[in-house]
Amino acid sequence: MTDTDGAVVEPVRVSFTINGGLLTLELDPRVTLATALREHLGLTGTKIGCDQGQCGACTVLVNGRRINSCLTLAVMHEGDSIATVEGLGTPEVLHPMQAAFIEHDGFQCGYCTPGQILSSLAVIEEIRAGMPSHVTGSLEGPVPLSDEEIRERMSGNLCRCAAYPNIIAAIRDYAGAKP
Amino acid sequence: MIGEGISRTDGPVKVTGRAHYSLERQEPGQALYGHIVGAGIGYGRIARIDASAAERVTGVHLVWTYHNAPDQGSPEGPEGDMMDRARPEFVSDRIDYYGMPVAFVIADSFEIARHAAGLVEVEYEAEPGRYVLATPAKTAQWKSETRIGDVDAIMAEAVNSVDQLYSTPYHFGQPMEPNACLADWRDGHLTLFLTAQMLNQLISGLAATVKLDRNQITIDSAYVGGGFGSKIVLHAEAVLASLATMHLNQPVKVAFTRRQIFTLVGHRPASISRVRLAATPEGQLTAVGHDAAIQISPSEAWDEAVSSVGRALYATPNLLTRQLHQTLDMKAAEPVRGPGELAGLMVFESAVDELAEQLGVDPVELRIRNDTDYDPDKELPLSGRRLVDCLREGAEQFGWSERPRTATRRDGRWMIGYGVASSMRGHFQTSAEALVRIDPEGWVLVRSDMTDIGTGTYTIVAQVVAEVLGVPMSVVRVELANSNHPKGNGAGGSWGAANTTVSVDRACSTLLERIRAAAGTTYNDIFAEVRRHFPDGLEAIGRQLAGSEDPNYQTFSQYTYGASFAEVGVDIDTGEVRLRRMLGVFAAGRILNRKTARSQLIGGMIWGVGAALHEEAAVDPRFGSWVNGDFAEYLIPTHADIPAIDAIMLDDFDERANHLGVKGIGELGAGGTGGSVANAVYNATGVRIRDFPITLGKLLPHLPRDR
Ligand code: FES
Ligand code: FES
């Protein structure tokens, strides 16, 4: 690969695990993690809604933390462990959160849905770990797993179909059902 | 089966990331990537464009500008059909709107294409453009006028009247899946994996643009990541991907960036309305007037029906509704969810609230007193008119009797108010066809080019087939959204569910007649009879007639109805408005699936919330560009903005709509919902904001000082 001026954009080697499997790729360093997943690995469950960190459709978990995969370059993830929606469940054997989204009709078009599902799993962990949010009343003691907390923390995941009330119902159901 | 709240049949593939949307389709193999360069001025011409630096980038296959773009069909004049018209790109050096494509780069990778796009050098000669919608003058040339009696005369002598100006902003559909196309030219046939709402309708314009026969084009839109009107009209991604694959003989992918969805896809036009209402002291309307000015473009006039949507909402002896088209040098407007209603009913229902306040009549009661069963425009009786039922049920369930007197209730730092508004949306009957095939192996196949853009079409079609044929849903395979299938009506305008299911039901009925003719009226296993009498299986095409061919549509004016109730809190210090709860009650004919229908209605209601409180695309009056054209700055409702919302669907069946009793619901939820939020803001604060959306900056200066 060369630039106009003849400056070479050399591919860069990167290795990470995706959904438990180790992969090594040679990538143009400009490739974002979202594009690497979608265009280089065929993992199109990760969606691109804005490609600029404003919608959450591209949410994946990196080492257990949710991030917008469109805002990070793939080559920055050497050695990281990445979880995408494809690793959660299959149409035949759904993850309980996926089943809850179906039961509560937490989507219409489904395009924001993988991001919503991954984000919601991370949100529950963040609340359980006691991480405060803008709406947390007190920094002392445990953070309540309230609708208000969930809504606040899910607000980086836009849904233009506006399935919001049903998404909250699905998350509540899942979180309550868990021991 | 019909009506049950069955979970979406496409749910499992969607929640697991296995549903492949346009660009994600793998069939064509490795594709090239296209990227569009948009104009940096709103009006004028390209003085110089030089793509040579971009062309020299390794991995770039070609760069098109108006100098070298392929020959394309020519558009018709401004009155031409929205779907049939050719929409060529790179026609000349002229720039008609901000962001209009000036160059198109195709490269081996997305990164190379975007990098090279940045190297295209363009110099412009900007000319003064018209970008500001003006309040109509008295001498305005009004269009699409409906006039009964003499509104001016009644207004002149009315004791109780409202005469106010309202404005609504440019507004965008902005589905989460960007407009995108994966095009593949192979053996003289063009296949598009396109995110689109109406396939065979769109092919007309595409064929005219790229100069192919219709039958040389297939569009496959198996999964569509939302539409809201923005994927009805043919856009540049489909045109350029098609031309590029035909030119290079390789598959080509093109997606708009989110910012390009603001410049290359049409918007709901801004509007300025004058609403006039007059009433007797008892609250009987004596005159209703709604004049609205909307933006159109020089090339196309999408007539957003702002002024006319309230025509048959209430009884009135005097009525005048008129539209004014103002030509601005902007992208042509297009359908956006709730065309006409979302803006028109929001302002109209605000005016009704103003009248109620002035008369001292409860806003629900005022609406009930002015109920009607007659459409004065079509001069026909209204079928399925149940607005009063919606209002009464909603008032009861919401606890409307607890509504505070204006600007009196507090909850801590929040001023609390309730608001109500009516909704009404036309039910449109359009021609549609669907094929149903019973296979002797024990399954049923349904085919239509109808799309499921999140509307639940896959699910409701399977429900109808299962019920009519008496088979389990699990044996029904629904294949939608392929343009080679029988032509349905597409998803848009709330046309889909009713017209599609009627055609599917008719196909099933035809099959049942044939089976009964062969097997007798009582049989146990439909598949056993098919195996016995029709060893190769049997199939039929069912048809829904266009409204113009169907007597029921000529003798009744068909609408759906709803009422929404909102509670808001307004922060006493900042003027921030927060929705606290909301209820919608709807009468929309027979509901096919209570779960998916409720979701769609709630989604529509949230669009009403966005219209009232958040959404506005602002034009820079100097350049004609969008000031806030992305998701960071064009605010749409988020999780944190939306508390508990519910939608109640009244048991309903409109036999005048069709024999299934079904009407559309896609737009109805949005309807006048924005008005209920606006009216709640007034109830909370005593301040009436007539310039939507109601943002804190507009509200704060008017809040009571002693708060
Ligand atoms: S695609 Fe990454 S945040 Fe929108
Ligand atoms: S389900 Fe369509 S955007 Fe969320």
Image: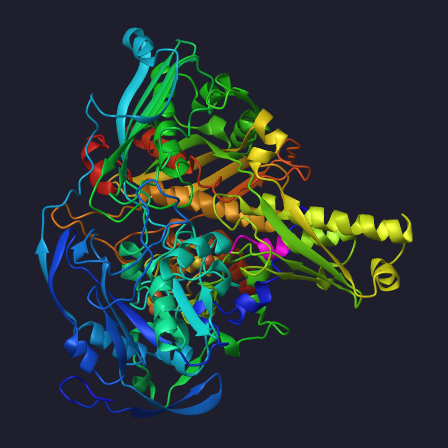
Instruction: In this rendered view, identify the residue nearer to me: B91 or B305.
Output: B91
B663 or B419, nearer to the observer = B663
Q: Is residue B667 above or below residue B348?
A: below
Q: In the drawing, does residue A47 fall left or right of residue B325?
A: right
The quadrant of the rendered image in which ligand 1 is seen is: bottom left
Give the color scheme: rainbow, by chain, secondary structure or one colour.
rainbow
Image spot of residue B467 (x, y percent): 74, 50
> For this view, does B212 lie left or right of residue B103?
right
B455 part of magenta stretch: yes
How many labels, in total?
Answer: 0
Q: Is residue B220 visible?
A: no
Q: Does residue B553 appear left or right of residue A61 in this picture?
A: right
Residue B578 among those drawn in magenta? no
Taking the spot 48% from the left edge, 59% from the top edge, the residue there is: B214
User: What span is in magenta?
Assistant: B453-460
Q: In the rendering, at what x and y percent does residue B72 appear?
A: 32, 60
What x and y, as percent, mark residue B704? Answer: 22, 30
On the rendered image, what quadrant is the C terminus of chain B found in? top left
From this view, report whether residue B161 is shown above or below residue A66. Answer: above
| Most foreground residue, B487 or A153 | B487
Judge left or right: residue B683 versus residue A121.
Answer: left
State the residue in front, B137 or B92: B92
- The residue sitting at the top extreme is B157
Percent across and percent down for residue A138 are: 35, 59
Is residue B635 among the parts visible in the rendering?
Answer: yes
Residue visible at 85% across and 64% down?
B531
